[in-house]
Image (spheres, grey):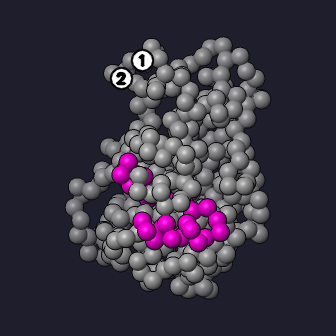
Amino acid sequence: MIQNRKEEHLRICLEEDVEVHLHTSGFEKFRFIHQALPEIDRDEIDVSLNLFGKKLRAPILISPMTGGSETGKKINRNLALAAQKVGVAMGVGSQRIAIEFPELAHTFQVRDLAPDILLFANLGAVQLNYGYGLNECLKAIEMIGADGLIFHLNALQEACQLEGNRNFKGLVSKIRDACRDLPVPVLVKECGWGISQEVARRLKDTGIQGIDVAGAGGTSWFFIENYRAKAKKKAYLSESFREWGIPTVESLLWVREVAPDLTLIASGGIRTGLDIAKAISLGATMAGLALPMLKAAVHSADAVAEKLTMLIEELRTAMFCIGASKLEELRDSPYLQPVHRNYVNVKGPLR
């Protein structure tokens, strides 16, 4: 049953090694040039932004993860408490299970704990080919009082999932219809394999307002589904897909080139505030994290808030050391340079 699958996903994420090792996100290929005389006051650095009508105190999204079980409910509520306390955005896991089993809606509902956060509902785009339409999208939004809806794309996961839905035909036009009819912003995200230029080009004219590139370099749902399949002695995809996908940095740069006016979220292997600083300098509006937040959320909301606070302090420190007092000054910073053979090219800006 789908409820059991949700619990299996959580257990595997928490107990098994599900992160890519060889295929990095790409952030290590860039380095900030330290400015010994930044000429700013660190205490005055502003990392806030306004997005979709909400004020965020930092450019961080707690990426969509879970729901549909009691464990998922605990995690969502700890994440929401922390998001409210620290002032960041949050998405819930796929709500398909709660649409098909309305008695599980409470495992996604967090508005009572987080009335002020930017909150995203979440559905698999492929479900638009399996009977879902405007009504189901509205249910997902209304279920949690969401400020926006994320359609996730997960073709490789569906291909290797035992219960996968694999008909991805005609989704662009259906996403376009949803954008036209829904009362909130619609975003599209990958699930760990990145968005290519071609896909971004097709998506940008649908009416979506943002793309989360969710590139390769962090958690791999291929690992997770293969763990499940092996446990049931039904594995059928070889290890050749372990390193599949577009690295996060590469995907971010590609999508920015094709769709510069969209809200861009960088996720996939983001682990530090320095990663967040590099992502924003490369063009992201904000950065998303999942597994680090999940591992904290199984303990407490305070553990999540502590992790978020550390990330923000690291971001502020990176900005301080290059003399950027606000996010607008961090974006396209001339002090972010590619690293070539352990040599930093300091002859000019990145672009």
Q: CB under 8 Å between callouts 1 and 2?
A: yes
Q: Is residue 72 above or below residue 132?
A: above
| Kind of residue sitting beneath label 2 | His
Q: Which mark is residue 245?
A: none
x and y percent of residue 126 in the render? Answer: 42, 72
Observer-nearest residue: 308 or 255? 255
Over which residues does the magenta segment extend? 172-200
Residue on which the image places disc 1: 345
Q: Which mark is residue 340?
A: 2
Within 10 Å of disc 2 (Cα), the crowding (few <14, some 14-19, many 20+) is: few
x and y percent of residue 336 in the render? Answer: 51, 26
x and y percent of residue 128 in the render? Answer: 45, 75
The question of residue 188 being in magenta is answered with: yes
Between disc 1 and disc 2, whose residue precedes? 2
x and y percent of residue 104 in the render? Answer: 60, 81
Snapshot quadrant of residue 66:
bottom right
Q: Is residue 50 above or below residue 74?
A: above
What residue is at 58 percent from the left and 33 percent from the top?
331
Does residue 271 appear to the left or right of 240 in the view shown?
right
What residue is at 45 percent from the left and 14 percent from the top?
347
The question of residue 163 being in magenta is answered with: no
Does residue 236 appear to the left or right of 264 in the view shown?
left
Within 10 Å of disc 1 (Cα), the crowding (few <14, some 14-19, many 20+) is: some
Element under label 2? Answer: strand
